[in-house]
Image (tube, grey):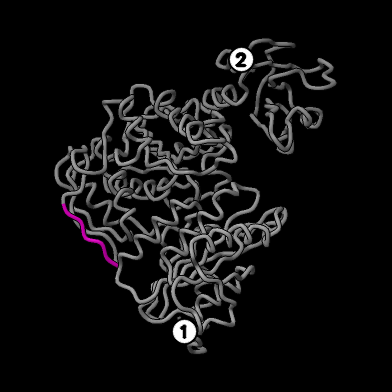
Amino acid sequence: MQLTELVNVMEVTEVTGPVGPEISALCCDSRQVAPGTLFFALPGTIVNGLDYVPQALDRGAVAVVAETIPPGWTGERTLLLVKNIRRCMALAASYYYHQPSDGLPVVGITGTNGKTTVTYLLEAILKQADYSPAVFGTVNYRLGDRSIVSSHTTPESVELMRVMAEFRQQGADALILEVSSHALEQHRADGIKFDIAVFTNLTPEHLDYHGEMDSYFASKRRLFSDLLGEGRAVVNRDDAFGKRLLKEFPNAISFGGTGTDVSVERIELGRDGISGSFKTPAGMVVVNSSLIGEFNVSNLLAGVAAATALGLTAEQIAAGIAAAPQVPGRLERVANDLGVLALVDYAHTGDALEQVLRTLNQLDRRNLISLVGCGGDRDPAKRPVMAAAATSYSDLTILTSDNPRTEDPLTILAQMREGALANSSTEYGPEEVDQIRGKAFVVIPDRREAIRFACRQARSGDLLLVAGKGHEDYQIIGREKVHFDDREELALALESQRTNGVQGDV
């Protein structure tokens, strides 16, 4: 493809050099540049793409897109100046890969919590309607049996369009995307033609990036105001920010409580799942789901509402819900012979953790044991909030490390400990477990040892929640990523407990 074609679709303000070169690839990482590449010099908070222009040129880039003239620019190659490089990159990628979102149903799902679960539900429903959906999300990018490890919830636009085009060539006839606030703010999804946009909820998260809730909401809103076009919005009316969207987009399909387009007719919650029925524009939908907990009722409503917006039948929707697999790292059960309902969940905000623990408290149980940590180099304000949520609902809380990254794990735990103590919880040492009474917490910095400790306390009839990392199979310590999977560690610890017998009690 000639560069001149891409110039015509990008919002270029100035061109220096010829526009006739043949473009063989698009790239924003200088390490991946090959001869014939159009290189996008993205600005960044840690690294700046302008600093890597010489490396990109040395590797064969024939043209550079930038917002400002790169330092030391010699003019030997073509330079395209633009006002919004990320938007231009998305538009160029869509054109270069032949508009891969055109001509098939495309669903975008945004919100703080529930995005991943809703994608799995909608994927299963579409399969029951004889579609072959491709999914892009936090866990992976997938089509049928093919799965690619995800780099971001919503990848950079060049990667997103490339993989989308590959999946279409391999038979994808529907697209489902988790659309993160970062992606919307950074225009990664520009160039995609969404038919359905789903809003799940909005609670404090990523405020280290967005600053405050209105800014966070403004990023989410872009999916509806800028990218949906003539498509249909699907919005949670039970959420305060959802109500704001519904006022702005009155033709949206609403879901939630009484009086919404998609609402609960009857519901039963248990340790084995959710059953009941929903009222929908497509008729009454029978619900038999393996999902656990009250908050997953909202996720089910969102999936059902999106499916009705796509025109699917009540029978197809019900069959999809029943066939939906366990969602990786979302209240994912870890099998054991101890009679313990052991669960791994991705909850890593105060609101998400509170929702999970509140719903677990509604199930039949003996004791509720929770293990939680907070990531480093991320919003520190949520750390005491998460610890307070955990100690409010748990009989025993173990505070531990998550992904400390470049922060001192003990500093993170000290901030969490403040939240637990402010919540009138009592701190015990691991060796004092036999004395624990009332709301109690233990601090064990090593996550593996913390999981083993939690399993030593668990008895038949207990609920054990390991929260924060969910589907992740790594731990980031410093700048090193090491293999660590909560599901693997929990399974090993439970099996060891079964083999060695129980010790201690709560």
Instruction: Rate crowding at label 1 as few (under 14), some (14 to 19) or many (20 or more) other CA atoms within 10 Å.
Output: few
Residue under pointer 1 = 505
Up/down of 334 relative to 47, above or below: below
- Residue 472 % position (x, y): 55, 57
Q: Secondary structure at mark 1?
A: loop
Residue 263 location, quadrant: top left
Q: Earlier in the sequence, mark 2 or mark 1?
A: 2
> Which residue: 31% across, 30% down?
246
Front residue of 226 and 354: 354
Relative vertical location of residue 359 with respect to residue 2 in this rendering, above or below: below
Q: Dot 2, crowdedness within 10 Å: few (<14), some or many (≥20)?
A: some
Residue at the image position 44 percent from the left and 23 percent from the top: 226
Magenta region's main secondary structure?
strand
Residue 350: percent from the left, percent from the top?
48, 52
Residue 485 vertical position relative to residue 266 in the rendered view, above or below = below
Residue linked to disc 2: 7
Relative to 430, 105 lies left or right: left
* Res 37 visible: no
| Region of the chain picked out in magenta, as a range | 266-271
Q: Considering the numbered disc 2 on the image, is that residue within a helix, a strand or a loop?
A: helix
Task: Compute the Cα span from label 2 to label 1.
Answer: 68 Å
The numbered dot on residue 261 is none
Name the spot of residue 107 as percent of width and height, x first.
38, 36
Locate residue 171: give its quadrant: top left
Q: Is residue 222 magenta?
A: no
Residue drawn where x is 69% and y is 33% of the image: 44
Side of 122 relative to 42 (left or right): left
Answer whether labels 2 and 1 touch (C-beta < 8 Å). no
